[in-house]
Amino acid sequence: SRQMLPRVFLSQPLQNGVSRYTCQLKRITLKFCKFRPNSLGAREFIENGDFLEFARANPQVACYLKPRRNRPPVLQAEFANGSVQLARIDSFPAEFVRRWFWLMRGRSGDDLLPLHENLRSFHPSVQGVWTPFTFGRSVGLGDLPDSRHRPMSPSATELIQQLHRLQSARMS
Amino acid sequence: MLSRLSLCRRHPLCQHFAAVVAASRRPVATFEAAPVAPLTPPRQTPNVMHGTRLATDPRWRRRMREDLYRRRMLAGPEPERPRSVWSNWSRRAELSAAAHRLGLAGLAGFSQQWLDRVLTFRESAEADGVTADSPSANQNVSKGYELDDESSDSVAMATPPTPAESMPRDNAELVPTGRALIAEHCDRFLARELPHVPEDLREQAVSLLTSDQSLSFVAGHLGLAELLSGVDTRPSMLPLSVEADAFAALVASAKLCCPDVSEGDEAAWRLTRDFLLTRLHNSDINEWWTIGAQRRLPLLSESLAAAGFPADEPLEFRLMGQSAPESPVYSCFQVGLYIRREFLSSGFGETAAQAQDECVSEALKTLFDTADSRAPMNFKLTYADLASALE
C-alpha cells in the first residue's frame, strides 16, 4: 500500500525506448531439482523445448540451467541496472514457468513500487504555468486601513464610542 | 546469571543442529585475489532481531533462530566477489548476449572474439600474467555444459570471425580513438540541435557528457562492467575511468570492425546517440552548463548582437507586477526586459533585483532556444544527417 511503500516516478533506465529499445534482461538462471516433485513444472518446461525456444528467441539473454539437489525451483533474473529478481516457481505448471520467463524478459529491473502517476512529463505545461500576474494583475498593493474591508464585529474602540454616543444622547 | 540463550546453546538439539549444518556445508564459490580491507563486522549484534520471532514456533526454536541470527551478524557480510566466480557463468554466452544487446551482432566483421578483445585491458593482463589461477582466467572457463546449438549460433554470428592477425590483443589503442569519437559525436549533435548556444557553454555540456562518471554510468547499465577481463571487476575495485574506457573502446570497435566506412560510422554514432546522448532527454539542457553571475549581462549583450539587435540599443527593465511588496515573506516582483519597446522575457523574484537576474536568465534561454517550450531533441538522427548539417 502507499502508506508503507515509497512512491516513485515513471522512468526507464538509460532512457530506454527514446532512441532504441534494449532488452534489459541480461541473464536468466533456472534452478531446479532433478528429482523432487515441486520441480516438475520446471523439468517439463525444459523437456518440452520451451526453454530452448526462449533462448533462441532471445539471443540477447544468456540463459542458464542450474540443477540443485533438494532445493525448490527458482528463477533468477539479472538485469542491466544490476538488480536481481527471484521468482519462486515451487510446484508451478510448465505453462506458468514459461510465462514467468517471458515476464522477466519484458521487465526493466526496477523495483515494483507504486507510481505517483501513470505518466511523467518534464514539460507539463504548454502555454506556461499560471501565475497571479499572467493576466496582468498586481495584487497585495494598497494602504491599510482600507474602506473596502468591512469588519465582522465592531472593535473595542468602536464599542466604547457607541456607548459614549448613546450616553451623550440620553444625557442631553 | 546465565542467560536463557546460553542455556539454549547447550541444549542437545541446538548442538545437534549446529553439527548438521557444519557437516552439510557446501563449498562456497571462492575468489582468490589481492587482500582487500574487509568491511568491518559490527562489534555488537544489533538489538532488533529481524524476522526471528515466529509465534507458531516453540520457544526453544525461537531462541535457536535468534542465536543463529546473532552468529550470522557476527560473521560479517559476504565477501565481495565478481559475477564470474559463480557456476552460472559462461564468458562465451555472455559475450554473445552482449553483442546482441548492443545491436552489434549484425555488423559485418564483428565477432565474439573481437568483443572479447575490446573488453580486455592490457596492463593487468601483462603484469599479473594470465595463469590458470588468476582471476581473469576464471572468466574463460565455463563451469557447466554449454549447449552448442548450431542454429542459435548461426543466427547470432552470421559472419565468420575476423582473422587473428588483424585482431588487436587488447583495447589499448581503441580507447583513445573511442574517446575522441564520442567527444566529436556529442559536439556535432549539440552544435546541430542547439545552434544558437555559444561554443564555451556547449563545450561545458560536452565535457560533462563525456566525463568518466557519465560514460561509466552508461557502461554499467549496458552490462559491460562484468565482462571486462584483465581488471578486477568487483564494483568496489573497478575505477570509473576503466568502465568509461570500456565504453569508448566499444564505440571505436564498432567503427573499425566494419570494412564499409559508412556502416562503421553509422554503427559507432548509434551507440553514442542511443546510450549517451539520450541522457539529455528529460533533463533541462540549461543544467548542463553554468553561466557565472558576472558573465550573464555581457553574454546577453553578445547574444543580442548576434541576434541582430544593434549594440547601442538600451535594455529596459520594467516592473510588470508586484504582490505584497512591503511584506518580508510574501513579496513577489515581476520584472520584464524590453528592447526596442519589444518584450523579450520576464522573471520573478522576492526582490526586484532577484527578479531582474531571473529575467536576464530567461532572456538568455530565449535567445539560445533552450527554453522549456523548445522542440524536443531529435534522437533519430542518422550519421549522414549529422555530417551534412555542418557542411
Image (cartoon, coloured by chain):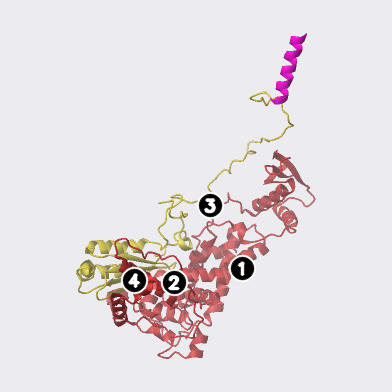
Task: Chain letter for mark 2, please.
Answer: B
Magenta residue span: A155-172
Frontmost of labels 2 and 4 is 4
Image chain in yellow:
A
The answer to whether residue B278 is left or right of residue B289 is left
Residue type for callout 1: Ser
Residue located beneath label 3 in the image: A122
Q: CA distance from mark 2 to mark 4?
A: 41 Å
Residue type for callout 3: Phe
Residue located beneath label 1 in the image: B207
Q: Position of residue B203 (x, y in %)?
A: 64, 66
Quadrant (top left/top right/bottom left/bottom right) for the N terminus of chain B: bottom left
Using the rendered view, name the quadrant where residue A70 is placed.
bottom left
Task: Chain letter for mark 1, please.
Answer: B
Dot 2 falls on a residue whose secondary structure is loop
Disc 4 + disc 1, Cβ < 8 Å: no
Residue located beneath label 2 in the image: B223
Dot 1 falls on a residue whose secondary structure is helix
Identify the residue at horizontal 72%, vertical 18% (top origin): A162
Q: Position of residue B219 (x, y in %)?
A: 49, 71
